[in-house]
Image (cartoon, helix red, strand yellow):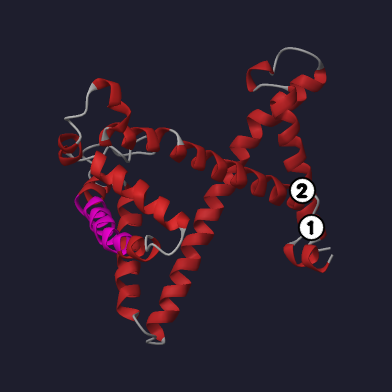
Amino acid sequence: MKRLVPRVITSAVGILLILTAFIARPDEAGEGPWLVRAFAYIDRNFSVWFSILAVFAFILGGASLLKSHLSKIMQRRPDWPYSVVTLVSFLAVLVIGLFKLGGPPGLQGEVTDASAWFMVVFEALYEPLMSTLYAMLAFFVASAAYRAFRLRSLEATVLLFAAFVVMLGRTPLGTWLSDFLPKSLNFLRIDTMSMWIMRVPNVAGHRAVFIGIAVGVAALTLRVLLGRSSAEGDQA
C-alpha cells in the first residue's frame, strides 16, 4: 500500500497532464465544453501545485546536504574540510537570500537586484569559480581528445580530421592558409569546411542524440505512468 498509493497518484497526474496538452489550453478556462474547461483548469493549477511541491523538494535537498556533510565532518572522513567549506557557503548564501540583505526589503523585494548581496556573491565568487572550473576542464578535454583521436581506426581518423579542420577554421591562421584558393574552389577553404562541419554533420549528430534521449524519456515516462519500477521491469 505504501508504494501503490504514490504510484496511482503519479500515474493519474501524469496521464491528466498529457491529456491537457492535447485537449485544452490554459486560456480556455472560460470557453468550450465542460471537459475542455476542466482540463484547462487542471493545466493552469497543477503548475502552481508543482511549484509548491518544488519548495518542499528544495527543503528536503537542503536538509539532506546538511545531514551528509555534517556526518562527514563529525566522523573526520577523507576530505572533510571541503565539507566545512560547502556548509559555510551554503548557510551564508541561504541567509543572504532569505533575508534579502542589501537589497529591497520585504517579501516583494527582488533578490536579484543589483544592490542585493546575493548578486554580489554570485558575481564576485560564483562566476570566477565557474570560469576556473571550465579552464581546468580544458586540460581534461585535451587529454581525452588525445586518447580518442589516435589513428587506430577509420572512425578515429575521420574524427581527428574533422576536429582539426574545425579548430583551425576558427582561427585567423586557417583563413590565411586557404586564402589563395579561387572562388570556384571556395568549398575547399578551411573556414568554409569548418562552418559546413558545424552546420551539417554536427547538427545531424545532435538531432540523433536528442531523438535518442526523447525516446528514452518517453520509455521511462511510460514505465512511471504504468507504475513499473526498474527492479520489476528487470524481473519481468
Q: Secondary structure at mark 2?
A: helix
Few, some or many residues within 10 Å of mark 1 (<14, 14–19, 20+) = some
Residue type, label 1: Arg
Q: Quadrant of the rendered structure where residue 78 is?
A: bottom left
Instruction: Give the residue number, with chain letter if any, for mark 2.
Output: 225
Q: Position of residue 228 (x, y in %)?
A: 79, 57
Residue 98 in the image: above or below residue 233: above
Assess whether residue 131 is covered by the magenta stretch: yes
Q: Position of residue 182 (x, y in %)?
A: 22, 23
Residue type, label 2: Leu
Residue 19 in the image: above or below residue 147: above
- State the residue at coordinates (37%, 81%): 73
- State the residue at coordinates (49%, 65%): 63
Q: Quadrant of the rendered structure where residue 141 is?
A: bottom left
Q: Quadrant of the rendered structure where residue 113 is?
A: top left
Q: Is 51 situated left or right of 180 in this image? A: right
| Stretch in magenta | 124-142
Instruction: Give the residue number, with chain letter if any, for mark 1.
Output: 228
Q: Secondary structure at mark 1?
A: loop
Residue 110 in the image: above or below residue 65: above
